[in-house]
Image (spheres, rainbow, N blue to C red):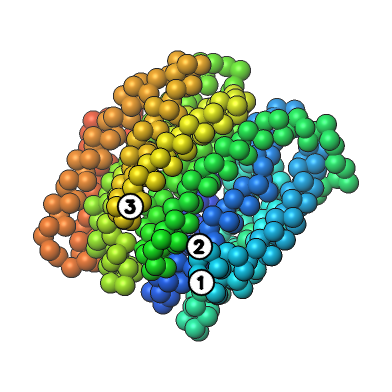
Amino acid sequence: MSNLKQKTISGVAWSSIERFSVQGMQFVILIVMARVLMPEDYGVVAMLAIFLAVFQTIIDSGFSAALVQKQDRTEVDYSTVFYFNIGISIVLFLVLFFSAPLIAEFYNTPILTSVTKVAAINLLIIAFSVVPRAKLTVLIDFKTQAKASLTAVVISGTVGIWMAYNGFGVWALVYQSLLNNGINTLLLWILSRWRPMWVFSMKSFKKLFSFGSKLLASALLDTIFRNIYTLVIGRKFAAQQLGYFSRADQFAQFPSANLSGIIGRVAFPVMCELQNDEEKFKNAFNKFLRISSFIIFPLMIGMAALAEPFIRLVLTENWIGSVVLLQILCLAFIWFPIHGLNLTLLQAKGRSDLFLRLEIIKKTVGIVILVATIPFGLIWMCVGLVASSIVCLPINAYYTKKYFNISLFQQMKQVFPSLVLSGSMGVLIFLLTQLHLSDAVTLTLGISVGCLFYLGIARFLKMEEWKELHASLVFYTKKTK
């Protein structure tokens, strides 16, 4: 087996371990804290989401991807990016800190003044982690990242739970976030053993920024669009409604965004390495597409089918208002693997200009749909996200067809078997929920029967995705013994 293939399988494995151990632990922590805190507490924190997300995107400025994409990167490149990250984070911290009263006034939520000032410290902390994380990604070393992330989430989660049970309210969420980012960044520095040189090269900056600036613009558009819903909901509806939406959004994105992220993090450096071999490049794209869809489709459809017993059992009746929103959002985020891999393909080829062009078109479509659905309420705003996701499929695939001769029809043909099998599984699970058993029994039975049905049929039909996934698991199991 080739060294690149070994690195790819190992990268996927450790990226999966990092994402799902960390996100799994965060998921458990979220459940424990949500049973103590109120939807309003989460609503207050969610009001800051768009500001923190936009500023974090500016701190990165596309330099992480530029470092990974560049084939002849040097220590001067890494150091230049590092000093830029630190400088811009200080500026943005001050902007957010002194804007805190205006943000609180905008939402008519006085506590946001102090919450914003403390949460802004995250910007300074995250700036120190950008380059060490990028360096590890270049090496496809997700094992080290997994160690740092898991340690950070366990310690910060323990403190957050303690604070929640001792009446700290929204501050439990704020300090948990600070502690998580702080420990993670510290461990990345220790484990990566990278230290910056005392140098800042304007030549290096310009070269990296020529690629990264377009990704920055694209990321800003995407970040603003993804978070504008919290801005609109927080302004137009009560904090409780925003709390319902933020939890539904987080649960819906948990399998889709994380798995797409796992595969995308590995696919990007792998496809960058193959960018000069067209046949291998296209084969890698198709394989990543099939595998990601095979895994993500059933998870999203299964979650939609089991949303009600899941929310009621895990978060209690206080959060029942999240059920319908969760079901709708699952149908919006199910297409993440197709969206993400088409864009990763452009990044790997260095076509950040096309990436930006697509983002402008898609976000224009998304904003039009958002504006059109606001008057009809929160549920229809979520339905608008489903419509936006479907409309953007052919947009994302446009340049993939034009420059790489991989059409959306060909992509859909590859993922169609997984989609049909997932839909069949979803119908079966839905029928089980109509038996009116207890929530615990329904959830257990639905997950068990769904998994057995999906994997059993995939194996019986000898689906290519099943064989590829099974072969990779067997290889990795032997390698780790």
Decide: is 456 above or below 193. Answer: above
Residue pictured at 24% horizontal, 37% vertical: 421
| Dot label at residue 134 | none
Please state which amino acid type lies under the numbered disc 1: Thr
Q: Is residue 480 left or right of residue 137?
A: left
Residue at the spot of label 1: 109
Between disc 2 and disc 3, the foreground one is 3
Between disc 1 and disc 2, the foreground one is 1
Location of residue 306 in the rendering, given as x and y in whole percent from the top left corner:
25, 56
Q: CA distance from mark 1 to mark 2?
A: 10 Å
Q: CA distance from mark 2 to mark 3?
A: 20 Å
| Dot label at residue 375 | 3
Please state which amino acid type lies under the numbered disc 2: Met
Q: Secondary structure at mark 1?
A: loop
* Residue 323 in view (yes/no): yes
Location of residue 278 in the rendering, given as x and y in whole percent from the top left corner:
54, 16
Residue at the spot of label 2: 47
